[in-house]
Amino acid sequence: MTSDGVGASVRRSAEAAREAARVLALADRAAKDRALLEVARELRARVPELLEANARDVEEARGNLSAAMLDRLRLDPARIEAMAVGVEQVAALPDPVGRVLSDAVRPNGLRLTKVRVPLGVVGIVYESRPNVTVDAAALCLKSGNACVLRGGSESVRSNVALGRALRAGLDSAGLPAGSVAVVDTPDREAVAALLSLEGLIDVVIPRGGHGLIRFVVEHSRIPVIRHDVGNCHVYVDSRADLRMAEEIAVNAKVQRPGVCNAMEHLLVHSGAAADFLPRILGRYRAAGVELRGDAAVRSLAPDAREATEEDWSTEYADLIVGIKVVPSLEAAIGHINRYGSGHSDAIVTGDPAAAEEFLRRVDSAAVYWNASTRFTDGFEYGLGAEIGISTQKLHARGPMALEELTSVKWIGRGSGQVRG
């Protein structure tokens, strides 16, 4: 397809989404929930079709993606079932649209009510993970928004197949199929075309690596809700339960290393290093984690590469970990605030005062005491799903779920008031 053809195709999808958004904004909860339940049913009915499309994507991507990124791309029956369950959970959540946030009467008798309303049309640009297609569409639908979805080129077949299931569910429930548009070309021109559609798309949300996010921020003519990289930390304090710290540090790094809430850097207080480091280094080696560390770490682990200045700012999204020994809580907080991406950071300690200091001063969207960073997730937070983790401070921060996909409207009810 030519550049002009790609642009025209994306524009047609956005125009259909704009028309659909007007219908969705007025749809009641019953209609939206019915559509979501139909989507869940379609996902379960189409498992063979979805697996076949995904297998073709995985086979083509093999050799071009790391093992962790291939894992993010791959679907299996359990993951498809988890998508369907996630859609059902979104259906069960309260509808944010129309919720009254404030209601007051001014001295002149003018009544002002502040209510939640949909954003309109949400454009979402993302990489690798096909489940984002379903999570994003479900959240947009429930919050009364239409969406234009452009996944990574490596997952185009999977996303198109998921899009068919989504549109079939909408059609069965009597809502416009154009409410969910899945861009069906891997051509990068589609991203540029989407970012130019000011007036048709109200907000863009990028979800992926630093390069994708930077491209969207620099080229979009549409407001962007930014999800930055996930350079997450776990800090093991001098008063940590080392068995607990070991399990948290392994879980945060190893369970799914390719996701944005996986830990990338481990900070260890010098008072705990002699006891803790040999234990955690052994666990990481057994899990196949590549070690990078400062001089103190490398004195205990000759197989560790020297961690460079660039390492401390890097989101590996792989089985690689940077480890640093720090002299104090103050040093740990300073390191995180300097090098972290403001995503998710954790402290492991038995000292409540140290924990509260960490929670108060680390400037991230999510901070934890004695828990893994892997919990920064809309599903784990009880939000049903998420469209991404916002690391910016305007409009939304942290897991973006239903409430974050709405704006507000002020409604004034008067009896002839005029301003003097």
Image (spheres, helix red, strand yellow):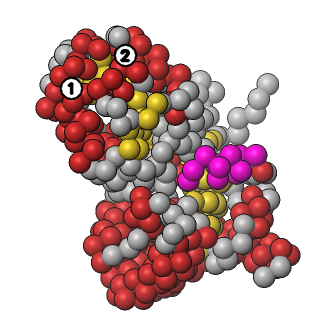
Q: Measuring 70% from the left and 51% from the top, which residue is drawn there?
A: 216
The amino acid type of the residue labelled 2 equals Val
Q: Measuring 34% from the left and 10% from the top, which residue is drawn there?
A: 328
- Kindly identify which residue carries mark 1: 276
Q: Which of 111 and 336 is in front in this view?
A: 336
Indicate whether residue 216 is drawn in magenta: yes
- Kindly identify which residue carries mark 2: 326
- The CA span between labels 2 and 1 is 13 Å
The amino acid type of the residue labelled 1 equals Phe
Q: Measuring 50% from the left and 42% from the top, which residue is drawn there?
A: 315
Direction from residue 149 to residue 289 in the image, left or right: left
Please tell me whether residue 356 is drawn above or below residue 99 in the rendered image: above
Please tell me whether residue 207 is drawn above or below residue 58 in the rendered image: above
Most frequent secondary structure within the magenta stretch: helix
Task: From the top left corner, tell me how far across and down residue 227 is, in percent.
Answer: 56, 45
Dot 1 surroundings within 10 Å: few (below 14), some, or many (20 or more)? many
The part of the chain drawn in magenta is: 207-218
Q: Do the residues labelled 2 and 1 touch (CB within 8 Å)?
A: no
Indicate whether residue 329 is drawn in magenta: no
Q: Which of 103 and 51 is in front in this view?
A: 51
State the image quarter where residue 146 is shown: bottom right
Residue 19 at least partly seen: no
Circle 1 SS class: helix
